Image: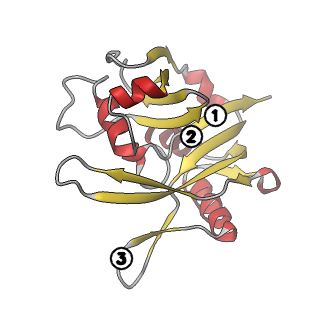
Amino acid sequence: MILSQVNISRRDAVQAGLRDGYAWHEGIWQAFPGHDGLHRQFLFRVDSRGAGFQVYVLSPVEPTVPRWGRWRSKAVKPSFLKHKSYRFQMKANPTLRQSSSRKRVGLCDEGKLRGWMVRKAKQHGFALEEEFLIVGAPTQEVFAKKQGGRRGKHIAVDFQGVLAVEDRAAFGNAFAHGIGSAKAFGFGLLMLQPLA
């Protein structure tokens, strides 16, 4: 896997049309020419940083740097995923599918959000040290698709804490493919820092 860090000023982001999660997704596609029409293989996260944005992109191939932002990329060594525990951060779109309508609804209650994160951890091969789990305040992120002008919104929640790996294969899959829904809009990338 390749992890890229991208820095871009707000002015340059506006000029590049990077205004919401859908636009960031389209902009990052520019870094992977020849992949149009194929399934998205990258994960990304956009953080507001002072006068600009810091973006992280995880991909299976080296990106071709587009005309916007300052990109720095490095390979993720296989040994990086072999630690027993990590400090983690993840911006997620926590949802629950309603049994009657089968529609996904965003979660906002802290207790339900904690339960969602604990369930996702178990599904993806790791356990949380729940006393260290920090659940950020839910916020709404609105997006508009160019084709048809359809508008939508996601609930964004930032989770931070400490995890212990229990199933190495499932954990590696979660790192490579993300956790939760709306990954094409900048959710689900598991940011990790190994702990001794």
Label number found at residue 190: 2
Q: Which badge, 3 or 2, comes first in the chain's sequence?
A: 3
Identity of the amino acid at label 1?
A: Leu
C-alpha span from label 1 to label 2: 6 Å
**Where in the figure is residue 107, as x and y percent of width and height?**
55, 67
Left or right? Give the position of 156 relative to 68. right
Q: Is residue 4 visible?
A: no
Kindly state the secondary structure of the residue where label 1 is placed. strand
C-alpha span from label 3 to label 1: 33 Å
Q: Quadrant of the C terminus?
A: top right
Q: Quadrant of residue 117?
A: bottom right
Q: Quadrant of residue 44?
A: top left
Q: Which badge, 3 or 1, comes first in the chain's sequence?
A: 3
Kindly state the secondary structure of the residue where label 2 is placed. strand
**Vertical placement of residue 91 versus 194, above or below:** below
Mark 3, residue position: 102
Left or right? Give the position of 179 relative to 191. left
Label number found at residue 192: 1
Kindly state the secondary structure of the residue where label 3 is placed. loop
**Which is more toward the observer, 135 or 148?**
148
**Which is more toward the observer, 195 or 48?**
48
Circles 1 and 2 in contact, beta carbons < 8 Å: yes
Crowding at mark 2 (Cα within 10 Å: few <14, some 14-19, many 20+): many
Residue at 34 percent of width and 44 percent of height:
22
**Which is more toward the observer, 151 or 109?**
151
Identity of the amino acid at label 2?
A: Leu
Spot the residue most to the bottom.
100
**Vertical placement of residue 9 versus 124, above or below:** above
